[in-house]
Amino acid sequence: MKIKTRYIFPAAALILIVGILPMFLVRIKTKTDVNKTELPSIDDVPREYWAKLAEKKIFFGHKSVGYNIIQGVKDIMAEHNFIKLNIVETHDPAQFDRPIFAHDQVGQNKDPLSKIKAFENIMDTGLGNKVDIALLKFCYVDLMRDSNPQKIYTDYQNTIEDLRGRYPETTFVHVTVPVRSAPKGLKRNLKESIKLLIGRPGVLDDNLKRQQYNTLLSDACSKIDTLFDLALAESISPAGSRCYAVKEKAGIYFMDSKYTYDGGHLNEKGRKRVAEQLLIILAELANRP
């Protein structure tokens, strides 16, 4: 006769897990800085700056989140009729004989080097010196827990330096890597908590790698080049507090959950928040002597 066996989870172990998991749940909930961070708004920009921006030729290389940002730009233009940009999805050099805010996909997700090479190729096949402003944005999936932020930064920086040498008439704007939001909902939060408990990597570890890259980029570029800190815009709540979580006493920044519908891509509120900061930086850059 075949005997059926059944494993009964010890009650003491269950009590222990239920008792200690809340400690980890608290660790992966985002907190907010006490100090408020005031981001500039469209209203802070002199009205005449927008006319100057509309005269520029811009190329923005991106992937999926980039479409969110472009839609955010369109949203803002619909609300502010003094911002008039010719937005076109293209990298065809023939389209750059007139003012344009062009954007297009570059490379493959999860392969940042492919994006760097694709961006360089676009510059080398007709856009170099033809565009006034060019910027490349990585996606959050390009830097994960097993990524090497230093190598990606070095590859990117070396390429930009080469492009700057070949095309001195073009201004290259640096963009920080977007971050993800903290797990939302008890089920997802519990899953990440268990990962923390047993030492497996999770969203905290992914955002840490992104933050390491962003710190390298910011430290090297913010004082001498134009930096669009996308991650900063994502992590500051509508109330002005910056969202972060703590792991091993280190603060790791997260996107505010109000800006996303899936933890990584931007909803209407998020895309407008990010697009507004991008437009402000571009407008200021377009009006430099």
Image (spheres, rainbow, N blue to C red):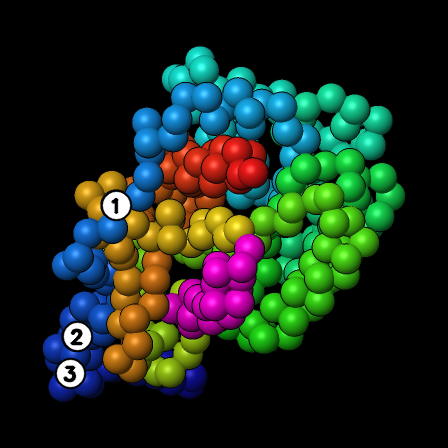
Residue 206 disc label: none
Q: Is residue 67 visible?
A: yes
Q: Which residues are magenta?
A: 204-225
Residue 2: x and y in percent read 42, 84
Asked whether 220 falls inside the magenta stretch, the response is: yes
Picture coordinates of residue 261, whole percent (x, y) = 39, 41
Q: Residue furthest top?
A: 81
The residue pinned by badge 3 equals 16
Q: Position of residue 121 (x, y in %)?
A: 82, 50
In the foreground, 183 or 30: 30
Three-letter code for the amino acid on which mark 2 is drawn: Met
For image coordinates 44% across by 36% down, the residue present is 280
Residue wearing tag 1 = 38
State which tag comes first along the sequence, 1 or 2: 2
In this view of the protein, which residue sits in the foreground, 180 or 84? Answer: 84
Amino acid carrying mark 1 in the image? Glu
Q: Label 2 belongs to which residue?
A: 23
Q: CA distance from mark 3 to mark 1?
A: 44 Å
Q: Position of residue 281 (x, y in %)?
A: 47, 40
Give 44 or 211, whichever is nearer the viewer. 44
What residue type is disc 3 on?
Leu
Labels 1, 2: front one? 1
**In the image, residue 203 lies in the stretch drawn in magenta:** no
Residues at circles 1 and 2 in contact by the CB criterion of under 8 Å: no
Element on which disc 3 rests: helix
Position of residue 98 relative to residue 8, above or below, is: above
Q: Earlier in the sequence, mark 2 or mark 3?
A: 3
Main secondary structure found in the magenta portion = helix
Q: Are marks 2 and 3 in contact (CB under 8 Å)?
A: no
